[in-house]
Image (tube, rainbow, N blue to C red):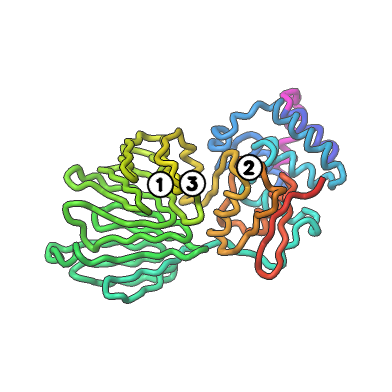
């Protein structure tokens, strides 16, 4: 079948007018290649992200088709194949959606190479960090590093991309007064299990400082972005200090984001309960809520959170809902370890809703943004610049 026939079949499917014979033709087309199957899986909600896509968009097929037609009228100059791929993506996730895997790669390969001008291939971040012991000694952490250390009768097991602490009965007070720090560089991520069984995932450009063994209170200090699954212990509260904000929990899971270049410190609760205190203010969160502390003096606020958008980074995805392009680019800067200039006033009001697979190259993501929302990525002197394409 040629592209005109496929266009017609997709139109019939999305508009709900497809006949049994056309449905069989569409399925046969889907079986012809992995790329075709990716498109059908996305449209039908059967991809590995299908349930999340359905929850995010709750899309109406007729409404989606109208959006696709509007896009078609704007981009008639593009090749039929590129337009077909856009229809496949847009039908599943509305205009502006970024999806992962082979479909993204194939679409990126077929774009007009003159639209984006990135001179180099920007690879994604990797699991790496630096462990600083209480003695000042530094240990590089990466997938290939497997070793065991001992400090003040505490066993430190390093197994690739994770590190775990086990305190012996002999460790005592000296272990409570000795601190380790894990620092994750830009373009990195890492995870660890603390001595009490609490798990922590560190995003790019983040750090966590903690005692080798916890005392009456389990206290840690973090910078950047960290997701916690706190081991329950009703007698020993778990306290996280971050840039003047104190978070107190007994057993729960939550995400805290406190990068220096972000205007707010955001704490998003997934399970359990969490007390947030900052500059004399205090609030108690329940699951699904987010506390924000405005660094410019706006105090504490509480709102309903898009939990997936705040926590899916640790599962290899960036998820965003009507998020400004500039905010997304700050995340891309940290993960890819590059400088992205978004100072152009043409970007005011540019919003995206969708997903980005963190382990795709930045070039692939830039190509899809270029296709869906008319933004152009260029590179000059090691700096990536983003502007809105002129109409």
> Pointer 1: what residue?
255
What element does badge 3 sit on?
helix
Q: What's the magenta region?
A: 15-32
Instruction: Sort mark 3 into few (<14), some (14-19) or many (20+) by Cα contacts within 10 Å.
Output: some
What residue did someone put label 3 on? 312
- Magenta segment main secondary structure: helix
Residue drawn where x is 75% and y is 23% of the image: 17
Q: Residue at x 20, y 51 (%)?
A: 217
Label 1–label 3 contact, CB within 8 A: no
User: Residue 175 — which label?
Assistant: none
Q: Is residue 302 left or right of residue 73?
A: left
Residue 180 is covered by the magenta coloring: no
Earlier-in-chain disc, 3 versus 2: 3
Disc 2 designates what residue? 352
Instruction: Describe residue 116's horizontal placement relative to residue 281 as left or right.
Output: right
From the top left corner, tell me how far across and down residue 136 is, in percent.
Answer: 31, 75
- Residue 46: percent from the left, percent from the top? 59, 37
Residue 5 rendering spot, x and y as whole percentages: 83, 36
């Amino acid at each position: 079948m040629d592209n005109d026939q496929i266009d017609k079949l997709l139109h019939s499917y999305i508009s709900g007018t497809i006949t049994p014979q056309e449905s069989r033709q569409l399925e046969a087309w889907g079986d012809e290649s992995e790329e075709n199957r990716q498109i059908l899986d996305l449209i039908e909600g059967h991809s590995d992200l299908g349930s999340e896509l359905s929850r995010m968009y709750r899309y109406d097929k007729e409404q989606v088709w109208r959006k696709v037609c509007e896009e078609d009228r704007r981009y008639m100059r593009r090749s039929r194949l590129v337009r077909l791929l856009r229809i496949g993506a847009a039908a599943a996730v509305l205009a502006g959606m970024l999806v992962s895997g082979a479909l993204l790669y194939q679409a990126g390969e077929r774009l007009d190479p003159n639209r984006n001008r990135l001179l180099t291939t920007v690879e994604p971040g990797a699991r790496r960090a630096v462990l600083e012991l209480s003695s000042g000694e530094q240990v590089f952490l990466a997938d290939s590093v497997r070793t065991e250390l001992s400090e003040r009768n505490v066993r430190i097991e390093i197994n690739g991309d994770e590190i775990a602490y086990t305190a012996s009965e002999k460790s005592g007070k000296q272990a409570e007064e000795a601190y380790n720090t894990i620092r994750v560089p830009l373009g990195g991520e890492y995870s660890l299990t603390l001595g009490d069984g609490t798990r922590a995932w560190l995003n790019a450009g983040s750090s966590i400082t903690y005692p080798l063994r916890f005392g009456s209170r389990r206290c840690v200090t973090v910078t950047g972005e960290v997701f916690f699954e706190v081991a329950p212990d009703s007698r020993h509260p778990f306290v996280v200090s971050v840039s003047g904000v104190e978070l107190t929990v007994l057993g729960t899971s939550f995400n805290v984001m406190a990068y220096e270049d972000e205007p707010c410190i955001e704490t998003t609760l997934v399970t359990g309960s969490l007390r947030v205190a900052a500059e004399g203010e205090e609030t108690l969160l329940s699951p699904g809520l987010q506390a924000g502390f405005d660094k410019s003096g706006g105090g504490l606020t509480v709102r309903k959170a898009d939990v997936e958008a705040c926590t899916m980074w640790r599962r290899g995805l960036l998820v965003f809902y009507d998020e400004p392009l500039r905010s997304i680019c700050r995340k891309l800067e940290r993960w890819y370890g590059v400088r992205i200039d978004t100072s152009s006033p043409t970007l005011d009001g540019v919003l995206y809703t969708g997903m980005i697979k963190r382990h795709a190259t930045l070039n692939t993501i830039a190509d899809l943004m270029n296709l869906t929302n008319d933004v152009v990525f260029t590179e000059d002197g090691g700096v990536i610049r983003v502007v809105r394409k002129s109409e």
